[in-house]
Image: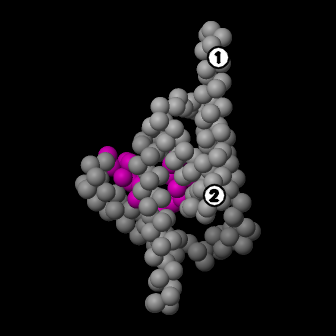
Amino acid sequence: MKEPDIRRSFYSSAITLVLLVIGGSLFAYLGVPAGTMVGAMFFVLIASLCGIKIKTFPPSAFTLIYIALGMQVSSNISSATIEALFTGKLLVPILIVTVITFFSSILVAFVISRIFSWDFSTSFLAAAPSGISVMTALAIEFGLDPLHISTAHLCRLLAVKTIIPFVFMFLI
């Protein structure tokens, strides 16, 4: 690799990091759902469309992301949760909710794949009732389109944040 190539790669990486930090911080500050990820995506998307060379991160960087996601998920589990699982109090409700959720996700994925002509795997991750970060990470892991999946989850989050207040005001 020649000196100008190294310099160009460094500048591309630096520009990408600056855009990620600015976009993520701004959207998080504004209170956008999943603001850090959505803001970073938005700023990098705009820069890409403007012709700025964006540097992608190596796949090994995702290992750290998965570790952080695992830490976040497991930090919400308490001894009371484990006790409730082992005593069987939650076993039947968990099984029923899991089956209903799984089959409703398959149905919604089927509808999404028919309407938008997406492959079923992408549609299934877009329809899965999970967090935007987790589903986007899974999309990247499985080689699916993370933009479609994260956009679908962002729309779901915005719809929920928009509709729920009215439901509470008028129906509850």
> Marks 2 and 1, Cα distance to the nearest angstrom?
33 Å
Q: Amino acid at mark 2?
A: Ala
- For this view, does 15 lie left or right of residue 168? right
Residue 42 percent location from the top left of the image: 51, 47
Q: Residues within 10 Å of mark 2 (few under 14, many from 20)?
A: some
Residue 66 percent location from the top left of the image: 62, 45
Q: Earlier in the sequence, mark 2 or mark 1?
A: 1
Where on the picture, by quarter, is residue 78? bottom right
Q: Residues within 10 Å of mark 1 (few under 14, many from 20)?
A: few
Q: Amino acid at mark 1?
A: Ile
Give 82 or 13, whichever is nearer the viewer: 13
Q: Is residue 5 above or below residue 78?
A: above
- For this view, does 79 lie left or right of residue 157? right
Image mark for residue 51: none
Residue that protrudes farthest toward the right in the picture: 79
User: Image point 63% across, 57% down: which residue?
Assistant: 28
Q: How is the image coloured?
A: one colour
Residue that protrudes farthest toward the front in the picture: 50
- For this view, does 22 lie left or right of residue 135? right
Task: Please tell me whether residue 21 belongs to the stretch shown in magenta.
Answer: no
User: Image point 31% across, 48% down: which residue?
Assistant: 118
User: Image point 54% across, 45% down: which residue?
Assistant: 43
Residue 50 percent location from the top left of the image: 47, 36
Q: Which residues are magenta?
A: 119-138
Disc 1 target residue: 6
Where on the picture, by quarter, is residue 126? bottom left
Give 81 or 157, whichever is nearer the viewer: 157
User: Image point 25% across, 54% down: which residue?
Assistant: 114
Give 167 or 74, whichever is nearer the viewer: 167
Disc 2 target residue: 28
